[in-house]
Amino acid sequence: MSMKSSQLSDETLKAIEALAVDLARLAGSEITAALGGSLAVRYKPGAEDALSLRDPVSEVDTRVEEIIRLRLADSFPDHEILGEEFDDARIYGSGFIWAVDPIDGTTNFVNGFPLFAGSIGVLYEGRPVAGALWVSTSHALRPGIYHARKSGPLMFETDVITPSANAAVRRRLVGQPGLVEQRGIIAEPRKTGSAAVECAFVAAGLMQAAWFAAPNVWDVAGGLALVEAAGGAVQTRGPEGWAPFSAFAGPTGEDEIPDLRAWRQPIAIGEATMVEDLCAALA
């Protein structure tokens, strides 16, 4: 019998969250060790045009995902993995899927621009139930790990984070420059180059909201767990328009197995009123 996410024991979720934190810390250690060195960089298959050159892969991306896969095989051998660097898209078995992005913001990373993250998200039946994001900077002005589990608090390292906004600030930050500038939304536009960083910043209250046009599951899975733990709203746009996010559900192939690697839907996250404004502007 299938066990719904609402029925997962807190002990199970604590163990999953703890491992997600360990794996995010591993990613952060590898990223930090590689900074300042000469990185081997390749580009994903495709024509040598401006679009394909937006998608670099460093040697660190590949090495970190390989290590994470080995650790997960030891700790949760029946869980599935959806990683950016290895093509194992046709999944589902135990119901648990670890969505792994070793470095989100690789273009920033390979250029030495210090905004990037290592993202670990855990899905149960498509729903984010835990997440851990190592970020290169934070509300504390230092690297560290934001993490959360279903029904648990948002944490930064060992501290509980309660997002709050300065009421004197009349224009907050929203992660989507073009939308804000073109649609008259009252906010200051920002774009970090990393969906995971923006999810963490929204969860921590550093940004009021963010919008992503066509993210991959591994870009946002860990971050959505943080946003929901912080009390934020998440909306996604499907064929019938914008609606509250419920779960990732990829298209089904001839084998009737969902392919989460093919999932692409717009996502808006943040404070509920601003998310509503973003969705209305994009309707």
Image (cartoon, helix red, strand yellow):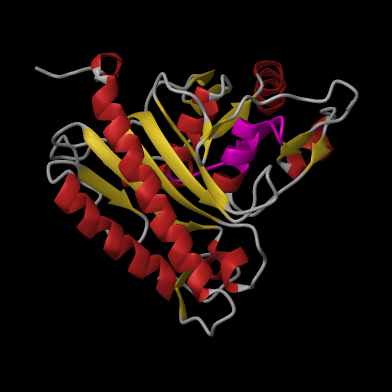
Image quadrant occupied by the C terminus: top right
Residue 127: x %, y % from top left: 35, 27
Which residue: 74% across, 36% down? 174
* Quadrant (top left, top right, bottom left, bottom right) of the N terminus: top left
Residue drawn at the location 59% of the way across and 52% of the way down: 194
- The verdict on residue 207 being magenta is yes
Image quadrant where residue 279 sits: top right
Give coordinates of residue 68: x percent, y percent: 29, 57
Place of residue 69 in the rendered image (x, y in percent of width and height, measured from the top left): 24, 57
Question: Outermost residue toward the bottom?
Answer: 38
Q: Residue shown at 63%/26% (left/top)?
A: 270
Q: Relative to residue 45, is residue 216 depicted above or below?
A: above
Residue 94 seen in the figure: yes
Q: Position of residue 184 (x, y in %)?
A: 85, 29
Count of numbered circles in the view: 0
Above-or-below relation of 263 to 24: above
Report the residue at 42% width, 51% height from top: 24
Q: Is residue 58 magenta?
A: no
Q: Residue furthest front?
A: 158
Instruction: Give the image quarter of residue 176.
Output: top right
Q: Toward the viewer: 49 or 244?
A: 244
Highlighted magenta segment, given as a residue range: 198-216
- Determine whether, in the image, residue 76 is placed left or right of residue 219: left
The residue closer to the viewer here, 144 or 242, is: 144
Q: Is residue 262 visible?
A: no
Q: Is 140 positioned to the left or the right of 194 in the image?
A: right
Above/below status of 36 relative to 247: below
Q: Looking at the picture, does residue 232 appear above or below residue 183?
A: above
Relative to 159, 4 lies left or right: left
Observer-nearest of 64 and 278:
64
